Amino acid sequence: MSYFSEIYRGFKTLINGFRVTHKYFINARKEIVTVQYPEERPVIFDRFKGEVIMPHDENNEHACTGCQACEIACPNGSIEIIWDRVLNEETGKKKKTIDKHIYHLSMCTMCSQCIEACPTGAIIWGQEFEHSVTDRSELTKVLNNPGSKVRADVED
Amino acid sequence: MDYEAQIKKNQFRTEEYKINMGPQHPATHGVLRLNLTIDGEIIKRVEPDLGYIHRGIEKMCEYDSYPQIIHLTDRMDYLSSHNNNEAVALAIEKALEIEVSDRVKYIRTIVGELTRLASHQLWWGVMGMDLGALTSYFYGFRDREVINDIFEETCGARLTMNYSIPGGIRYDIHKNFVQRVKDFIVHFRSKLPEYDQLLTGNIIFEKRMKGVGILSKEDAISYGVSGPVARASGVKSDIRKIKPYSAFAVQDIDFKEPIYTEGDAYSRYKVRIDEMWESMRIIEQLVDNIPEGNIKEPTKAVIKLPKGEFYQRVETARGELGVYINSDGKKSPYRMKFRSPGFSNLSALEDMAVGSKLGDLVAMMATLDLVVPDIDR
Ligand code: SF4
Ligand code: SF4
């Protein structure tokens, strides 16, 4: 007897499950949760940690003094700073200036240590998430624009 | 001579042989390799073979400063990354004798419970898929996505959140956080019964789960299993009850610890479904009264722990995570050890599996909820 009652229960539970799936099948247009990705863009939140970027203002100036705090704070060695002491004409003193702020995106674990260590707020999180490239050397980025210089009001 | 007579003449007998399950098997959820000795369909021995995803996290910790350690723990049990962060942060705070504000405690607990929910949703979806029901995968991920959006808005990442730091939390909660969490609870309270409708009562599912992979209470204790696996065998093991931390120590939160005594795959499944209801109750009690306060206690620029040993336990989605720090007073630990729940839970697999069919092994592994990077750090 239990054989037949199990067959009956099998059908009953099957229909029970179909009730859920068919509810969504019929109301498919109302409750769409997927995004047609390349055409529709997902919403990216402001705090999203996509990559480290260095914002520049309209005069092509940034806030990085070359203090290397971010380089020391990084647990993975993702940041390399190439710097030099350049003579400042106004004061006549030599001042530490960055040449290149090199950022290896491929080694970055998005841990925020560099951004919290930076005393001048020169680097921030960018929201870019499409990082796929065809060659891994493209993941090594120079964050300061060519020809850029440090903003005059930034003290180190 | 006909076939049957031929078998009789040749004394047809069976022989044991070895096969590999994994490291690239879709049902092992990562690079876990099981050396199986089987006799026909019957399992004789199970030998887990680890090492395919060993990154040496404990050794890396010895070279990193304490704030840098936090982001490594995200990569252990990536499905309960916030609980891992919290455990390390609590251990460091214990050593430095910092008392964080109630606001931090509440936020940590809410995010921790959301992590548990997200982990169980993923487990539910993937477990259904392991047993051949692909539908559950989409339903689990649909609801998990809502939590991931909450995390992304507040913590900045969807999986490896890196949110708790020694002395507090990295950012204050986003202004939409409370509303989004409330919306999620309303949403998920209406969707969780669907999970039951789809799988729990289904006769095929029950036949594959009931009486499969039985772990007795004595074995559960002696293997040191924890979390839902222990609770399904009747062992009370919830750290949130035994040794309350964060908001559990501040407010008397009303929640039950689901206990089943059968110890089979089906009761492990039921424990996790019940835990989802309980997590929602915990969040509901906390989310409306997050107190004001500092989100970060001041710490020294270079954190140095005093000499000594420090241990902290938390309850992650998989069970008890223990963090052991042995400090010699420098800026990085002398030795760091994680007692991960997955490792002990995996050790009980052989005991469950011997004598059962090969197909049931997948059901057992699915209900153990293994995350291989957690087992093999
Ligand atoms: S986010 Fe972390 S890993 Fe990435 S560059 Fe900054 S410090 Fe290094
Ligand atoms: S980015 Fe910030 S921390 Fe790094 S060198 Fe520049 S100023 Fe210093």
Image: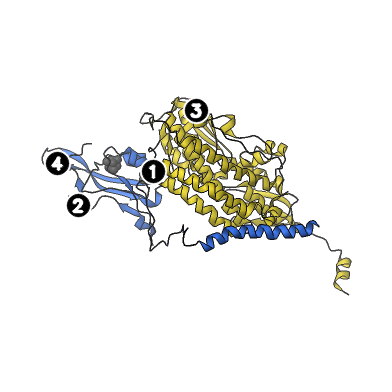
Chain colours: A blue, B yellow
Nearer to me, B136 or B197? B197
Q: Which dot marks residue B84?
A: none
Q: Are marks 1 and 2 on the same chain?
A: no
Q: Which dot marks residue B176?
A: 1
- Given the image, on which type of amino acid does mark 4 rest? Asn
Q: Which residue is mark 4?
A: A88
Which secondary structure, mark 4?
A: loop
Q: Which residue is mark 3?
A: B250
Quadrant for the N terminus of chain B in the image:
bottom right
CA gap, disc 4 to disc 3? 57 Å
The answer to the question of whether label 3 and label 2 lie on touching residues, with beta carbons closer than 8 A, is: no
Mark before the other along the chain sequence, 4 or 2: 4
Seen at 32% across and 53% down, the residue is: A141
The answer to the question of whether label 4 and label 2 lie on touching residues, with beta carbons closer than 8 A, is: no
Please tell me whether mark 4 or mark 3 is closer to you in this view: 3
Q: Residue A18 sits in which quadrant? A: bottom right
Instruction: Tell how many labels.
Output: 4
Please tell me whether mark 1 or mark 2 is closer to you in this view: 1
Residue situated furthest left in the rendering: A90
Please tell me whether mark 4 or mark 2 is closer to you in this view: 2
Seen at 39% across and 48% down, the residue is: A108
Asked if residue B53 can be seen in this view, the reply is no
Q: Are marks 4 and 2 on the same chain?
A: yes
